[in-house]
Image (cartoon, coloured by chain):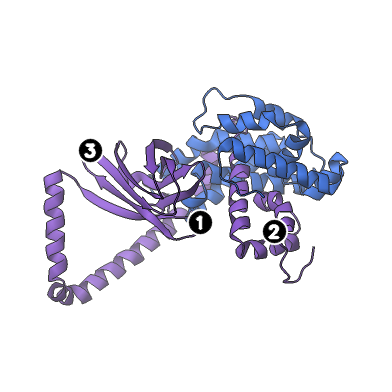
Chain colours: A blue, B purple
Amino acid sequence: MASGDADAAAAFVRRYQSRVYGLAVSVVGDSGLAEEVAQEAFVRAWRHAATYDPRRGRVPTWLLTITRNLSVDAIRIHHRHRIDPEPMLAGLAADPPVDPFGSHDLRAGLLKLPPEQCRPIVLSVFYGLTTKEIADQEGVPLGTVKTRIRRGLAKLRDALGVGSDER
Amino acid sequence: MNGDTADLGCDATRELMAELAAGVGPAEDRAAALRHIAGCADCHRELESISFVADELLSLAPEQEPPSGFEDRVLARLGPRAPRRLLWRRTRVAVALVAAIAVGAVTVWQVTSDDRRLAASYRRTLQTLNGRYMTARTIAAPDGSMAGRVVAYQGTPSWIFITLAYGAGAGPYEVRITTRDGREERLGVLDVQNGSGSWGTTIDMPVAGIAEVRLSGTGLPYLSAGFGARRPA
């Protein structure tokens, strides 16, 4: 690797490694598997940088989305279909010492949600469970799960001040 | 859920928004929903906002330092393939550029006198401003139309100036810059009345380091201007 590219790659990895690894280990729950996921996330992001569309979000958001998708693939490959979202919820509730991306409003909004809305949102967004899988796991009718997720996300959207035309 | 081309409708599509945002769920359901969304502006906006929330949630995951040596292991995986492709790409670009210059130089000199006068004027302007260069980008609205322009000037100091003329909204826009190395910086507030407004500020970063200028405000359409490919490309 040319020295300039190597410097840029090193800076890229150093800047985001704790966020990428933190998300991976939170989802897959295993340090070795999380490192595999995190490594692959950086490799894919670096090699497919041209596909990044700034209109779709910030670089860390894009990188974390790649990490989430890889983490979901990993837990499916390892047949971890029954997920306990509580450790993740506890991690999400903790305010970080610094908040460089202004996540306070979203975190506060998430914590205000009733558990029956918060749990399926976490299971869907972080663990990639379908609404059918969530309904089966939580023992709740499919329609109820869909309604809870939709209402919960609408509240979070309000917390972020994102526009809505919800009818 | 049907697998044919019948329209799913707004209500059924919105039932699937969370799964669409997370990229999960049966492929045929997602395909049917996306077919509807392609022709429904309201559902398109709904999916954009739900996807934004879902993506932002990921940033709440607690940070954790990876095991020792992680950075080296990632860099080792990135190493062998990048330079050859990059070198070859740069070589091809350079060869094409030289060939184009050689073939077109005489013709260009003859037919571009107006351009050269314009370039001379541009250079004099930059000299007067003690600046290095100036560039402009269009600002895209959610529907893909042009909502305005942003002019960025590299000099001492560097600055940007934004003009908007889109829709009929009123209120403050938060103006933010995303840099090519992923940092985000809030620059200030642009007030719009009847969809129009203009605003500028000095910036303490090189114009070449800007990846995107973004404007967002409650009840106002999200607007953005891309400044070209990110580093690394």
Q: Which residue is mark 2?
A: B10
Q: Quadrant of the N terminus of chain B?
A: bottom right
Residue B145 occupies quadrant: bottom left
| Sequence-first tag of 2 and 3 | 2
Q: Quadrant of the C terminus of chain B?
A: bottom left
The image shows residue B139 at horizontal and vertical percentages of 39, 54
Q: Chain of mark 3?
A: B
Q: Chain of mark 2?
A: B
The amino acid type found where label 2 is placed reads: Cys
The amino acid type found where label 1 is placed reads: Thr
| In the image: residue B141, left or right of residue A153 | left
Q: Residue at x 69, y 52 (%)?
A: B17
Q: Which residue is mark 1?
A: A51
Alpha-carbon span between mark 2 and mark 1 = 30 Å
SS at mark 1 in the image: helix
Furthest toward the right, the residue is A139
Depth check, mark 2 against mark 3: the one in front is 2
Depth check, mark 2 against mark 1: the one in front is 2
Density class for disc 2 (Cα within 10 Å; few <14, some 14-19, many ≥20) is some
Q: Which residue is mark 3?
A: B157
Alpha-carbon span between mark 1 and mark 3 = 33 Å
Density class for disc 3 (Cα within 10 Å; few <14, some 14-19, many ≥20) is some
The image shows residue A32 at horizontal and vertical percentages of 68, 37
